[in-house]
Amino acid sequence: MKVIVKLIILLSYAIVGGMVTEDRSYNQEIKTSIANGKVSEILTRNESIELLDPKVDFIFKKIFGTEENKSVLMSFLNALFKDNPKITSLTLGNVELPKELLEDKASRLDIRATCNDNTEVDIEMQCKNTGEIPERAFYYLSKITAESVKTTEAYNKTKVISIWIFRDSITNRKNAISEAYMTFEEYLGDPYERLTDKGRIIFIELEKFNIASIDTNDMLDGWLSFLINPLSVNAEFFEDKNMKQALETLKTISSDKKTRETYNARKDAIIDFNSSISNAKNEKAIEIAKKMLKDGLAIELVSKYSGLSKEEVEKLQ
């Protein structure tokens, strides 16, 4: 069940790291699924293929962001939106992969689409958390809205939905899916209410999705299962042609040598980027801790507010 949240809510988030561990775990899940016979016939064909992780943005875009697979994207969006809005057709925007994909560790591989009702959709598969996710989400939403207003020349005809997909938990919310709108606060008798539905942000935190209690009548459960681990998808979901097409696409690109090289290079770049972000945050924490110690604060307080362990703080004295 989706949870409606205020756009201005304070979200807690952490660095998304451990790409090496994540990849190893993902591959182990695939091998375990095959060994235990928990996969359907369509999945057990070509067992020798080691499927690439669809949570890596480069692979996600190849599955959901191509002209050949527009119906796959529409199926995912309709499952997520629950007919609000109902997508019957769409036009993809940035189909081409950027040339700087391998060189630029921070390059964005989002999927842009304009739907039949002129709703603009932007999908970000986040392999990394550079920090300030709520602020970035608001910025991107505002930027796309401004671009849309220039095109339609009308504020009331502009509707933008920004979707952010994370492999890990980045907020303190309990549900896997949360939505944010601009709202009025409850104040002096005025009720809490939505200001507008023209701007909408959706966070999907895959780590919070309970893959053991899926509803086979809900295609969204199928798509989230697919993103987490394609071999964990209940066989009933593959009766849907779009789910089957997504898997066949993944198997095809997983067999392509050049795609694998780009995939591995992209993962390495993300690992390097995450490491640099983590080091920068640690240096900042040390700087803060030193100032707090200089002001005479207790080690326990310094540890609590800097994020460093007590042992780390003691070494700074």
Image (cartoon, rainbow, N blue to C red):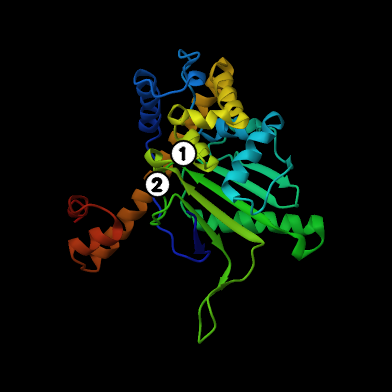
> Residue 6 at x, y = what percent?
51, 66
Q: Relative to 205, say whether 190 is above or below.
A: below
- Taking depth in this image into account, of 120 and 23 the one nearest to the observer is 120
Q: Which residue is mark 2?
A: 208
Residue 173 figure quarter: bottom left
The kind of residue on which mark 1 rests is Phe
Looking at the rendered structure, the secondary structure element under dot 2 is: helix
Q: Is residue 182 visible?
A: yes
Determine the residue positioned at 35% across, 23% down: 32
Q: Residue at x 49, y 35 (%)?
A: 227
The percent coordinates of residue 154 (x first, y second) are 80, 63
- Up-down: is 8 above or below 162? below
* Front residue (pair 8, 266): 8
The residue drawn where x is 42% and y is 53% is 175
For disc 1, the marked residue is: 273
Would residue 114 appear left or right of 278 to someone viewing this image?
Answer: right
Closer to the eye: label 1 or 2: 2
Q: CA distance from mark 1 to mark 2?
A: 25 Å
- Tell me the kind of residue under disc 2: Lys
Q: Are marks 1 and 2 in contact (CB under 8 Å)?
A: no
Q: Is residue 102 visible?
A: no
Q: Residues within 10 Å of mark 2 (few under 14, many from 20)?
A: some
Q: Is residue 113 left or right of residue 79?
A: right
Q: Classify residue 16 as left or right of residue 165.
A: left
Q: In the picture, residue 297 is in which quadrant?
A: bottom left
Looking at the image, is 78 positioned above or below residue 248?
below
